[in-house]
Amino acid sequence: MPFYHKLGKIPHKRHTIFKKPDGSLYREQLFGTIGFDGMSTNSYHEHHPTQVKEILGHKDVTPKIAVSTNLKSYKFHGFKTIPQPDYLDSRSTVLHNSDVSIILAAPTQSLKDYFYKNADADELLFIHKGKGKLRTHLGNLDFSYGDYLLIPRGIIYKIDFETEDNRLFIVESRRPIYTPKRYRNHFGQLLEHAPFCERDLRQPYELETNDEKGEFLIKVKKENQLFDMVYATHPFDVVGYDGYNYPYAFSIHDFEPITGRVHQPPPVHQTFETDAFVVCSFCPRLFDYHPESIPAPYNHSNIDSDEVLYYVDGDFMSRNDIEAGHLSLHPSGIPHGPHPGAVERSIGQTKTEELAVMVDTFKPLKITEEGMAIADDSYHQSWLEDNH
Ligand SMILES: [Fe+2]
């Protein structure tokens, strides 16, 4: 997060004596990224955050690849992902490469029995269905339909759902996820032309401080292994922190679309960036207002990026047979564009209610076994005009 946040109690100076009411010391932790060169947070704990009791074992969660080289467009039926009680068990990786995993999840219960920490990757959770609270060692965030939750790598968290019917679209990124640099000035502040501003980004507001000792299970994901680590102190024992590295929330409904007289290119929808992929939000908006404009997108060939679209809500005007919860993959190497009839259908329309999240990756994506289990294998032929 490129701006400063402070929560709870912190001492006047970094790296100085900070005493508890009983005269003993709070324990400081600098939580940094990219060595000491990236964003960091200084947190103050009831106990040393280093007290590992046991590493009990680990489980391999490497995605099983079914299609490793691909030139076919695919559609996946995201809502066919089977709901499961446990948050981690419910996560199903559909697409994967060395930078990013695209995951669908339908957890029916809150994560209560253990804590979770992804040491490999930043996690971007998009809440398609569900309502609840993300609880982290750096404070809590409420979430509901349409929220992105950005959880930087290493944040220890739990997730509470008020609902049973939860649908999450998750982007797990081994490259740090930032707001786009072109939206920011050289101080890091979001510029006037950006489709959102700092006011739209919600910071953790509620710190849970627990000074309990005992046995606390944290499942730590590292190199695609899920380690069972037992801590001797409660992982949520922070009394205060400040810095730039913390989880935050942003609602897709707060994204202000940029429109024009003629069709605007996908980068106007950009929401997040990494050096390996971008994330864009397609939101309800007015269509292009040139009298001769064609609101449907033109055919395009991003020769060197795979395009993943997750359809959230509304009528997606450029596609036929697309419903909420569908996921499409348009791979690099071939052009893609509107379905037959979509161009004509779009002419004269003044607005769209579509809501979708797009992830464009620079490296090709592999399709997993879980992905193929929900794939529509004939989608790549759905542009043939003779079929319609
Ligand atoms: Fe596209």
Image (cartoon, helix red, strand yellow):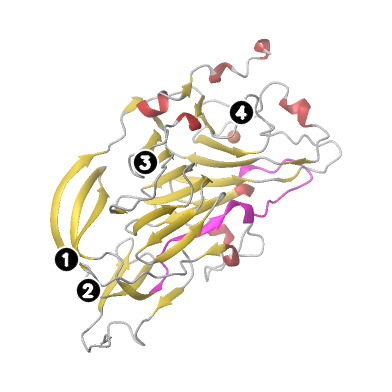
Residue indicated by mark 2: 47
In the image: residue 9, left or right of residue 250:
left
Mark 3 vs mark 4: which is more N-terminal? 3
Which label sits on residue 85?
3
Q: Is residue 310 above or below residue 139?
A: above
Say which element carries label 1. loop
Whether label 2 touches label 4, CB < 8 Å: no
Say which element carries label 4. loop
Residue indicated by mark 1: 51
Mark 2 vs mark 4: which is more N-terminal? 2
Which amino acid does the dot numbered 3 rest on? Pro
Q: Which residues are magenta?
A: 242-266
Residue indicated by mark 4: 322
Picture coordinates of residue 64, whole percent (x, y): 30, 30
Instruction: For the C terminus, give its image quadrant.
Output: top right
Q: CA distance from mark 1 to mark 4?
A: 50 Å
Which label sits on residue 29?
none
